[in-house]
Image (cartoon, rainbow, N blue to C red):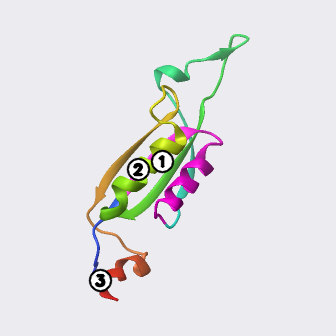
Amino acid sequence: MEVGLPFDLIVTIVNKGHSETVITASKEAGAEGGTIIPGRGTGIRENKKLWGIPIEPEKDIVLTIVPQENSDAILKAIVQASKLDKPGAGISFVLELKKVAGICHMCMLDQE
């Protein structure tokens, strides 16, 4: 398998129900889409109680694979749209991917 482009994985963790904001912002900035996975937070901000009963902090985890050349712009769009500069809004980070399979249409973009 020949891979033409280097890719990054943008991982964004937000409160449940805010994943569509992440997906919309990333698409507007050049991403093709993403994968949403349900999750549960265990951080210091997640220790809230309602009437003495612990509240399970539900999260959405958005995984977005993008060409490395686009990752900075897409991350910036996600941060702005999701207000990740505010405490408790979420977190987003980028991981460099060594190898990617299954997105052949993206791998061959530079060969056209």
Q: Amino acid at mark 1?
A: Ile
Q: Which residue is mark 2?
A: 75
Query: In whole angstroms, how far apart are the C-alphas of marks 1 and 3?
Result: 31 Å
Callout 2 crowding tier (Cα within 10 Å): few <14, some 14–19, many ≥20: many
Mark nearer the N terminus (2 vs 3): 3
Q: Nearer the viewer, residue 84 or 2?
A: 84
Q: In the rendered view, would you say 12 is above or below 85?
A: below
Image quarter where the C terminus lies is: bottom left
Q: Nearer the viewer, mark 2 or mark 3?
A: 2
- Give the x, y percent position of residue 17: 66, 42
Are the residues flagged by discs 2 and 3 in contact, CB closer than 8 Å? no
Identity of the residue drawn at 52% across and 32% down:
89
Callout 3 crowding tier (Cα within 10 Å): few <14, some 14–19, many ≥20: few
Q: Nearer the viewer, residue 77 or 93?
A: 77
- Give the x, y percent position of residue 82: 53, 41
Q: Which residue is mark 1?
A: 78
| Left or right of 51, for residue 16 | left
Q: Amino acid at mark 3?
A: Met
In what element is the residue under mark 3? loop
Q: Which residue is mark 3?
A: 1
Query: In whole angstroms, how far apart are the C-alphas of marks 1 and 2?
Result: 5 Å
Callout 1 crowding tier (Cα within 10 Å): few <14, some 14–19, many ≥20: many
Q: Which residues are magenta?
A: 9-31
| Left or right of 53, for residue 106 | left
- Give the x, y percent position of residue 98: 26, 64
